[in-house]
Amino acid sequence: MEFTFYEFIQGHINGPRHGRARSMGVQPYNSIFSVEGSDDVLWCKICQVYLENYIETIFEHVDEDKEHNVRLSKILRLIEGQNITIDAYLTNPTEDKATCNKCSTGVSCNVDNLGRHIKGKQHRK
């Protein structure tokens, strides 16, 4: 049986190696990290929950978990246009602060603290 180029590509995209690489790619920018000493569990910093370390579980959490998406979206909407970045928070498992470039300070990366900082005197200058 001969495969067409399209079938070959589809086979690759739907295969386990591509799925694993894709899941590893989405983990950091969704604040999902490996747990030290465990190959079986991951940690979602945004939701403060452990996840099983399976490709399907990662994508289910990132793509379909409403709470994960709501929490991340609230933070992103809040910091939009405020000169605040959360890249380090999203990609570094030990970083718990957003960076306010306007005030040159770190702010605990949650909706309440970010909201207070944005409304604060220093940031509004």
Image: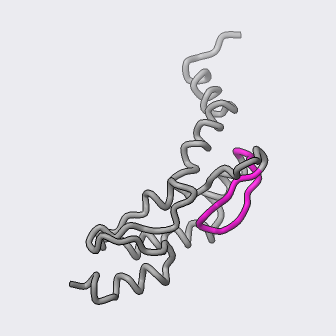
| Residue 96 percent across, percent down from the top left | 52, 67
What residue is rendered at 75% in x and 47% in y?
Answer: 37
Queried whether the magenta region covers residue 50, the answer comes back as: yes
What residue is rendered at 25% in x and 85% in y?
Answer: 124
Q: How is the image coloured?
A: one colour
Q: Residue furthest left?
A: 125
| Residue 84 percent across, percent down from the top left | 34, 69
Queried whether the magenta region covers residue 16, the answer comes back as: no
What residue is rendered at 43% in x and 58% in y?
Answer: 87
What residue is rendered at 26% in x and 72% in y?
Answer: 102
Of residue 35 and residue 3, the one placed in the foreground of this image is 35
| Residue 23 percent across, percent down from the top left | 61, 44
Point out the image quarter for the C terminus: bottom left
The magenta stretch is: 41-55
Point out the image quarter for the N terminus: top right
Q: Report whether 66 appears left or right of 107.
A: right
Corner quadrant of residue 101: bottom left
The total number of labels drawn is 0
Q: Is residue 65 above or below residue 25?
A: below
Of residue 73 and residue 82, the one placed in the foreground of this image is 82
Of residue 78 and residue 88, the one placed in the foreground of this image is 88
Q: Report whether 21 appears left or right of 90.
A: right
Q: Is residue 100 above or below residue 25?
A: below
Q: Is residue 85 above or below residue 33?
A: below
Q: Residue furthest top?
A: 1
Corner quadrant of residue 9: top right
| Residue 78 percent across, percent down from the top left | 40, 76
